[in-house]
Amino acid sequence: MDLTTYYLGKRLKNPIVPSASPLSRNIDMMRRMEDAGAAAIVMYSLFEEQIEHESFEIDHYLSYGTQSYAEALTYFPEAADYNLEPDQYLELLRKAAQSLDIPVIASLNGVSKGGWIKYAKHLEEAGADAIELNVYYIPTDPVLAGDDVETRYLDILHAVKSTVAIPVAVKLSPYFTAMANMAQRLVNAGADGLTLFNRFYQPDIDINEMEVVPSIHLSDSSANRLAMRWIAILHGKIKASLAATGGIHSSDDVVKLLMAGADVTMMASALLKKGPEHIADVLRDLEKWMFDHEYTSVEQMKGSVSHRSVRDPSAFERANYMKALNKYKLLV
């Protein structure tokens, strides 16, 4: 079976790519994912807040006491005295790029234009094969218009693209008013790929302590339906790579998203539950499914049940809503 696919202009040996998660926080775990068959790896995210915090800390230590002694600026602080998370990230990226034989994609997470964007260039220099730009933004201001939110995404993308030559994929939320139009605008602005979709982790309320608390629930296969729908709609309509993320757990999930039109399928929750070696199981089952259904390549499968290829494309649109409700059978 020919499992090769193309993503962000690169030929990958198969469509399985671990998405950004704690699994990529050390080289040994990344090697385990590569050994299990991962075609590429998206590293965990470097956040705007971490970069800005480092800049603030460095400025504090370099300027502290200068009001008293003019020569104080010649005394630099020890590295251990301030937050080095961005530097640690770059060093891990550098080691990964040197020691792994598969592409390493850096993840940059931010919500505003600013100095943190310069780190895109540092990621490229450290050996990143591409950057996944994750604009994790929840607009809470009631006077902020939808167009302003979209402009924020486009401005950040433009700023990052202007600093690097490597491909940039944008990881999107599903909550845009006109998703297809926004996808096209991002591609027009230079996005080489789109990753669908970002999961917004919903907080919970501790009713005993009466406070808001973080809450993370790992996904299951039902979570991939939204990405499946929009990838099927966008396939063949925009000139960019499409990655499916969220709810990819089994070979069945991979098959569905490939047939919808995804170039790669990204998984995290499944690997956090079952370990990196789960990749090998998924690939084995994928090959078996292809053999049983007489497919010889991933490219042959890709987009075969997309909006432009399926006999009844209305199933991806409003008609599916009516059909689903009308066919539901009460159990009581």
Image (cartoon, rainbow, N blue to C red):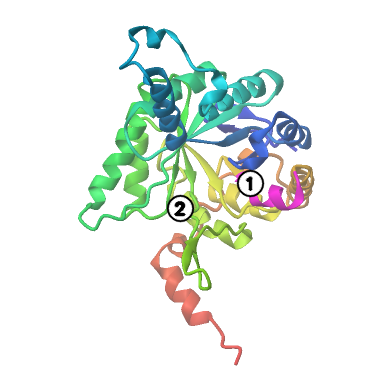
* Whether label 2 touches label 1, CB < 8 Å: no
- Considering depth in this image, is 148 or 179 the residue closer to the camera? 148
Separation of marks 2 and 1 at Cα, in angstroms: 18 Å
Give the prevailing secondary structure in the magenta stretch: helix
Magenta region, residue range: 266-275
Residue 265, percent across and down? 60, 44
- Considering depth in this image, is 243 or 172 the residue closer to the camera? 172
Residue 175, percent across and down? 38, 55
> Looking at the figure, which quarter contains the N terminus?
top right
Query: Where does label 2 land, which residue?
Result: 230
Residue 267, numbered label: 1
- Is 330 situated left or right of 237 in this image? right
Is residue 267 on the magenta stretch?
A: yes
Residue at 63 percent across and 59 percent down: it is 221
Is residue 155 on the magenta stretch?
A: no
Q: How many marks?
A: 2
The correct choice, above or below, for 148 with respect to 168 in the image is below
Q: What is the crowding at mark 2: few (fewer than 14 residues within 10 Å), some, or many (at least 20)?
A: many
Residue at 39 percent across and 67 percent down: it is 318
Assign a secondary structure to mark 2: helix
